[in-house]
Image (spheres, grey):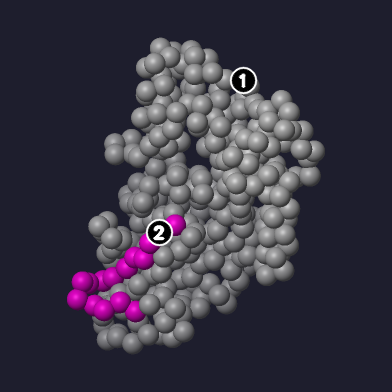
Amino acid sequence: MDPLSQVIGLLRPRELSWRMIAVREPWAIRFPAVKAVVFGQMIEGACTLDRGEVRLTLRSGDFMMMACPPEWVMRSGSEVEPIGLKALFADPTALQRRDPAASSARFLAGHFLFAEPNADHIAGLLSPIVHVCAADVAAQRLGRLLSLLDDEVTADRPGRSLALDRLLEVILVESLRYRATQVEGMRPGLLAGLADPRISRALRRLHMEPSRAWTVAHLAREAGMSRAGFAARFAEIIGKSPIGYLSAWRMSLAKAALVSTKRPMMEVAQIAGYGSVSAFSTAFSRATGLSPTVYRQMAADKGECLNSLLPAPAINSANAPQSAAVGPSR
């Protein structure tokens, strides 16, 4: 399994929610800051998305995705005072009471959450905004996936939760693939590393055998570089030293094993590349502030609390009435 697939596999989608929003010009909507991944696609019309110093134009068919964004606004024009998203949900027709001859817009807006403990990985993979133009092949692929998502959400078929889970993962992969092709201006992280031919070779070997006793010299040989050159290049592109990245990845694997399995602590220690439980416990406590045993128990308690709130075990899927709450569904 390649590194990107491994990281996404650890994220474990937990909740999906989306709505189709229909408006008439002039309009503006203020979206709150959220600790989630938000996505959207313009179905009809166009708008401007403002997020701090970032501004982009979304046209019909364009797709966008953001990880844990601060407050942002979507609008038809700068002169319009935005309405809050919560207020719009309370009055779905608030932005449709316009001149019937005025231009209309429709867009799909949604978000998905990821289960602990490794949900923070997604913010490191995504740029502030992933924008895929409709003319791009990636947008066409994403459009078909979103159409399938719509179909699954609005139909009560057997296996719907599993289908939604997989569709969500594929949407993520398509967005990240597109991001990986945008080498210019890419910030440090895994995607930047995978875009570099030499660093990518070392990353793939490291992810294939995370418990191996890697050294910088070993990884440099995998990359076909000198030790010093590799260490400097890796830190520049990834944002961490080779051993720092390896340690962080091992801790991610250990956290996932503690939360999602009942493996003996010795097996978890070996997954993380440690030869003893005591050495693993010391390293884990230093990295997280909790012992592995306490971390596992806290995750279990948190999971029981979430299960009592969420009707579906894997994804709290939006149902048909919810998807059509603001504007018509496709």
Coordinates of residue 271 in the picture (x, y in percent)? 69, 32
Coordinates of residue 273 in the picture (x, y in percent)? 65, 28
* Secondary structure character of the magenta stretch overall: loop
Q: Nearer the viewer, residue 200 or 306?
A: 306
As for residue 247 lying within the magenta part, the answer is no
Q: Residue furthest left?
A: 79
Q: Nearer the viewer, residue 197 or 19?
A: 197
Asked if residue 157 shows in the view, the reply is no
Secondary structure of the residue carrying numbered label 2:
loop
The residue segment tinted magenta is 68-83
Is residue 145 placed above or below 75 in the rendered structure?
above
Rate crowding at label 2 as few (under 14), some (14 to 19) or many (20 or more) other CA atoms within 10 Å.
some
Q: Earlier in the sequence, mark 2 or mark 1?
A: 2
- In the shown orientation, is residue 4 left or right of residue 281? left
Q: In what quadrant of the picture does the N terminus appear? A: top right
Mark 2 and mark 1: Cα distance apart in space: 38 Å
Q: Nearer the viewer, residue 219 or 321?
A: 219
Q: Which residue is mark 1?
A: 213
User: Which amino acid type is marked by label 1?
Assistant: Ala
Asked if residue 242 shows in the view, the reply is yes
Q: Residue at x 63, y 22 (%)?
A: 212
Q: Which residue is mark 2?
A: 69
Q: Residue at x 34, y 79 (%)?
A: 83
The image quadrant that residue 191 belongs to is top left
